[in-house]
Amino acid sequence: MTATSATPATNPAKGSSFNSDRQQLMLGAVLILGTGLLPSLLGNAYWEHTFHLVNVYIAVSILQNFLFIDAGQKSFGQGAILGLGAYGFAIAFGLHGWGFLLATLVGVLAASVGGLLFALPALRVQGFHLGFVTMSAAIVFPQLLTQMSGLTRGINGISVSLPDLAAKPFLGLSWLTLLLTLVPIAALVLHYIIRNSRLGRRMRIAAESPEAARSLGIMPGGMRALAFVIASALTGLLGVLYVPAVGFISPQGFLLDLSFIFFFAVVVGGRGQLLGPIIGVWIIFILPSVLLVQLVEYKPLVYGILTLAAVLVFPDGIVGSFEAARRKRTQKGGGEGGFRLAAVNSALASLTPVPASTSTEPVVRVRGVTKRFGEVTAIEGIDLDVMPGEIHGLVGANGSGKTSLLNVLSGFTPASEGRYWLKGRDVTRRSAAQIGGMGIGRTFQNPRVFPFFSVWNNIRVGLDARRTPLDPQMQALADGFARTMAEDSPALLSHGQRRLLEVVRVLMKDSDLVLFDEPAAGLSPQEREDFGVLVRHLSRRLGKAVILVEHDLDLVWGIADRITVLETGRVVASGTPADLARDPAVQHLFVGGDHA
Amino acid sequence: MLAEIAVILIRGIAIGALFSVVAMSFNIVHNASGIFNFAQGNIFILGGFGAYLLANGAGLGVWIPALILVACLVGALTAFQGWITLLPLRTSTEQDSWLISTVSVSVILAAGLLLIYGPFAYTVSGPLPGYRIFGVRTPGAFFLAIVAMFAWYFALRWFLNRTLTGLAISALSQDMEAARAAGIPVRKLQLLAFGISGMIAGSVGFAVAPIITVSPDAGLRYVLSGFIAAVVGGIGNNTGTLIGGPLVGVVSMLTAYKIGGAYQDLALLLVLAVILMFWPQGLFGRAAARRV
């Protein structure tokens, strides 16, 4: 973890090196162009038909990849969503004679509704629970198609002919071929764009660390629902195109196996890699189709075995393994120069201080807050006021309720009794995401640093959470990070640097109150000193109130304006550092094992 | 009317007992490793195929040794699957690789059975006679299913609470890191848990072959119903499955009799969705299903 390849962070990045998303995007588009257009250009009708199907599968797998990794939702039911799109279109167009565009809209809407239905359980459960729910939906879907024969013609299926799409405007390429080339490319480009947008970053955080997400004002449930709807609406569009590609649809075409193909393609190709689903479909679908043309019944066995082999041999998938090797070779940004607070501090030191607040309204006012976990009372009857710009230390032995209080304040666990106000507004019953959006920023005991983001993007998610524009001087600081750390890998940062990274993220977020949960643990003496200076700047230059939970009593006594001492969940003393140092109730803290 | 209710109840509870057994076989692996084996339904069906191959129409003299043989073979196979599943967990940071590998094993098993035996459902006749209940002939295997549920329940209870090995497996479900630090051979116990889960599913699949669909694609129904039974009872909680399984079985039978067999899966999906939406920890749960 230490400085082996200490490339100075100020080195101009040559190309993108943190990840190869851009290169994968280009290559992926070229490959889709190839599978889309080549068979038609070569004039082979059989392969043209097969590769129409391949491109549908590629596009659905791209969306599955987005849903699975960028939004963290394990859905085994995307085949049913494709079927909803196909049936919605075929029923409206083929059976009721609606116009093409209107019928397309029906298909997309049907699939979106299906996506919303999937999102509903996802609000409550995750992981394999969601996998089972979506899997049972995928099993029930063809059964329902068969049963609702009045609507769907049951097992007889629906034939649709679309001569307009078969027309060949130029070079022997039909409209269908063109659509089935462009839509998958569009899906890939969209994946790239979303991933590199504010929305995409926030979605990924919601997937990886719901607590961190909520502290940044993100509602994880909303993100999941949105991801399901985006992926499903587009999968529905592909379902619409699937109909002319095969000419005939029946319940047998949308069995569970179809959903598995999409899921397996993502895994074999490389979870989260833009190029992954394309390579995955090639291996899972094209390989057996070409090699086992005569032996259709072996296909499920082959793709099952291929997937199992991929998990064992290439746990990151084919593309993922290449990417992991490339990253190992080229990653940079570690070492002592990797991430230093000193630069941040010198930038902050040049800020004009905000005028000292004359407000008598505390930023946070806590009255009688009690938190019980079953029989255990974690905190009891806590009263606390923190004024704007005040640095408030919260000390006490392990288990005295410091973190419990922070968790109640940031809305992670509801208070059992009592109320508290943020800037005069009662937020006792507000959710963590609402409170996170209202101007509380916090760090965690285990820093939430995301390995799939570059160092800059890890900071940037703080900016993403802002609702007000950044101060010009702070903006300059942020621009500096963007220039120097956009390609740096957080994997090379030391533990102390990771803590500081999280602190700088909170600095970028607009917050009137910052909660630090043991920020100095694992910091070197120099880093502690820098951190103390930073907290001073937060308070004096930026006017933020700070609540500091910390075992390093020297640090707390050195920088805090006021200190509250907790013991077994109760406030035993509160006052200025000087007063408390003489308070007999606090003396034992200094001789106990807690004194760092 | 009364007869119909009695039949629905008896058959529902008996079928539900099978779901409960599958749920218990889920639980032991889940408690020992956090893994949920998606192939468990196919493993259950393997037991049924074992009965078809070795003991179709045989008397008790053949049936009992064959039962033991099949239970051990399926147990060994499941332990092997467990070994494969646990391999990448040692190196990969991606903890959901087990999800993918167990799903792919379930696809491989179903596809393999399909290649060998074709898409047909095989009928197996067991050693027990049928009984007439309210004028309806009820195969003996229905009663065997309920007996099997209680037999495995009490056997597991004894094993997990009274033997040193069982207690060590229970310790894994409490805190795997602490267990590892205490010198418990985690990997071996996890493989044992896989083996036991295979023995549970394989033996009961064998014993009740006359009343289950012995066909390559039937595994899915049992993995889903077993999962729902586990969720209703609270994942990891074997006592809960004693209620969860029969509940799911009765809902399933009721749907089949009153609405139509084609809607059974839909009814179960709705049960699953409602339970997860309102009681994500199950009706008698202890483990946290919700991870938000």
Image: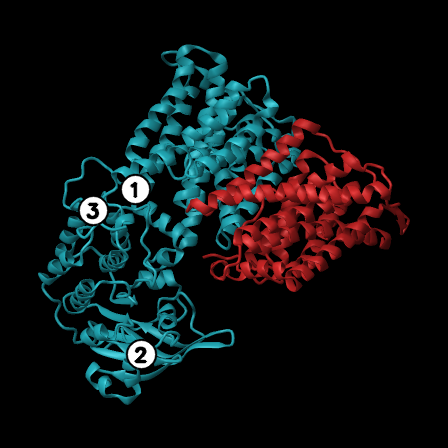
Chain colours: A cyan, B red
To which chain does the residue with label 1 belong? A
Which of the 4 quarters of the picture holds residue A495? bottom left
Do marks 1 and 2 share a chain?
yes
Structural distance between the alpha carbons of marks 1 and 2: 41 Å
Task: Using the numbered discs, state the Cα–Cα distance from disc 3 to disc 1 in whole angstroms.
Answer: 16 Å
Viewer-side residue, B146 vs A220: B146
Label 3 amino acid?
Answer: Met
* Image mark for residue A49: none
Q: Amino acid at mark 2?
A: Leu
Q: Earlier in the sequence, mark 3 or mark 1?
A: 1
> Where, by quadrant of the figure, is residue B153 drawn?
bottom right
Query: Residue at point 45% right, 38% down?
Result: A64
Give the structural element (helix, strand or loop) at label 3. Answer: helix
Q: Amino acid at mark 1?
A: Asn
Q: Which residue is mark 1?
A: A196
Q: CA distance from mark 2 to mark 3?
A: 39 Å
| Residue denoted by label 2 | A384
